[in-house]
Image (cartoon, rainbow, N blue to C red):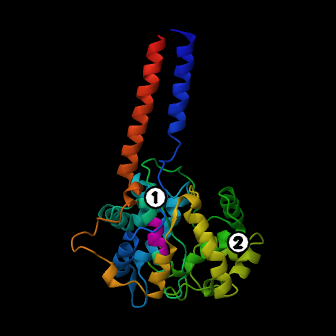
């Protein structure tokens, strides 16, 4: 074998190794696909009841964190069976199944749908904030690393260290923990005294002992590491919102560049204000899953097929060159 073919073979190996770390290339859409209005209206029926968010909405909010925090917001909690295979996700198998089915019927990626459902879930709560949503994530069937999720009994120092390793500040950690204001314990009991309200009162209730939070929240409320941030974020509904909304956006973009995604935040704003119109929901009676043009690029199957084609082209080209040098 010629030395040149050895070099080419080594280059080929490097190409293949590097290829697996690249995300599928997709074109950023100039406007938000209309399918997301349809999805929002569909979710409303199960996410809103008696003027506030339901248990399904609570699960969706929690699911967004569990998909992203281990590594990337890539849908792997559904597509790589993390929901069923990992104990920390066992209480979310129902919402995983629901969103997995909706991903197929609306022809959108699980990765996008998980973050969209969380934003709709938050907006469904009494007092819930309007958060951002960017579309264009693709799915992966490769699971995120294990052992990344904080436990309910983790102390404040360890929690700060874990979040810092993921690029989050103490204020962002405390703000995201505020989502527990509408949370429930495993036995179904409310964590907050006003479980139906997405409000800053949670922070004071945890501090004075009137709430029923997980131990991690108790530790943060009185630890020298986080007490200042806890009191600052929880000082008012405005301070809670000012800290929570950007922290939620940051979390929802883990593994992605916002510049590569399409801003669909107006859909969340429209849902929160109640301005979504029924007439815009379904253009054709049986076309629930037809979606708008271009959104197919976010589906796992499409991304995988495109990846297979590209990989096949690389293999064919490099192999042909190598053979010519033998």
Give percent across and percent down for residue 323. 44, 15
Judge by depth and name the residue closer to the eye, 292 or 117: 292
Where, by quadrant of the figure, is residue 139 drawn?
bottom left
Give percent across and percent down for residue 78. 40, 57
- Look at 45% across and 63% down and name the residue there: 112
Judge by depth and name the residue closer to the eye, 217 or 280: 280
Q: Is residue 311 above or below residue 272?
A: above
Q: Is residue 55 above or below residue 92?
A: below
Mark 2 or mark 1, earlier in chain: 1
Q: Which residue is mark 1?
A: 87
- Look at 43% across and 35% down and name the residue there: 311
Where, by quadrant of the figure, is residue 212 drawn?
bottom right
Give percent across and percent down for residue 298. 42, 56
Q: For numbered disc 1, what is the local secondary structure?
A: helix
Give percent across and percent down for residue 90. 42, 62
Mark 2 or mark 1, whichever is nearer to me: 2
Left-right relation of 244 to 270: right
Q: Magenta stretch: give its range.
A: 114-119
Magenta-highlighted stretch: main secondary structure?
Answer: helix
Q: Any magenta on residue 262?
A: no
- Look at 71% across and 66% down and name the residue there: 169
Q: Any magenta on residue 116?
A: yes
Q: Residues within 10 Å of mark 1 (few under 14, many from 20)?
A: few
Judge by depth and name the residue closer to the eye, 74 or 296: 296
Q: Which residue is mark 2?
A: 171
């Amino acid at each position: 074998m010629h030395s040149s073919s050895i070099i080419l073979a080594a280059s080929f190996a490097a190409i293949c190794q590097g290829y697996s770390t690249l995300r599928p290339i997709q074109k950023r859409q100039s406007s938000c696909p209309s399918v997301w209005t349809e999805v929002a209206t569909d979710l409303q029926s199960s996410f809103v009841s008696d003027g506030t968010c339901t248990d399904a909405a609570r699960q969706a909010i929690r699911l967004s964190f569990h998909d992203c925090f281990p590594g990337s917001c890539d849908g792997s909690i559904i597509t790589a069976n993390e929901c069923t295979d990992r104990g920390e996700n066992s209480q979310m198998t129902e919402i995983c199944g629901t969103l997995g089915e909706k991903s197929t019927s609306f022809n959108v990626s699980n990765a996008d749908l998980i973050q969209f459902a969380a934003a709709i879930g938050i907006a469904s709560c009494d007092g819930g904030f309007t958060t951002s949503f960017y579309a264009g994530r693709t799915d992966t069937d490769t699971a995120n690393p294990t052992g990344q999720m904080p436990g309910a009994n983790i102390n404040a120092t360890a929690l700060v260290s874990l979040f810092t390793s993921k690029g989050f500040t103490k204020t962002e950690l405390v703000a995201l923990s505020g989502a527990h204001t509408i949370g429930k314990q495993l036995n179904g009991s409310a964590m907050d005294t006003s479980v139906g309200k997405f409000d800053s009162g949670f922070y004071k209730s945890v501090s004075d002992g009137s709430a029923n939070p997980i131990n991690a929240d108790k530790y943060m409320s009185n630890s020298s590491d986080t007490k200042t941030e806890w009191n600052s974020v929880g000082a008012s509904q405005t301070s809670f919102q000012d800290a929570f909304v950007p922290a939620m956006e940051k979390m929802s973009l883990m593994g992605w560049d916002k510049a590569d995604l399409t801003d669909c935040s107006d859909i969340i704003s429209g849902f929160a204000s109640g301005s979504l119109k029924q007439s815009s929901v379904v253009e054709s009676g049986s076309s629930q899953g037809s979606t708008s043009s271009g959104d197919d690029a976010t589906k796992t199957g499409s991304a995988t097929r495109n990846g297979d084609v590209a990989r096949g082209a690389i293999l064919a080209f490099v192999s042909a060159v190598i053979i010519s040098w033998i």
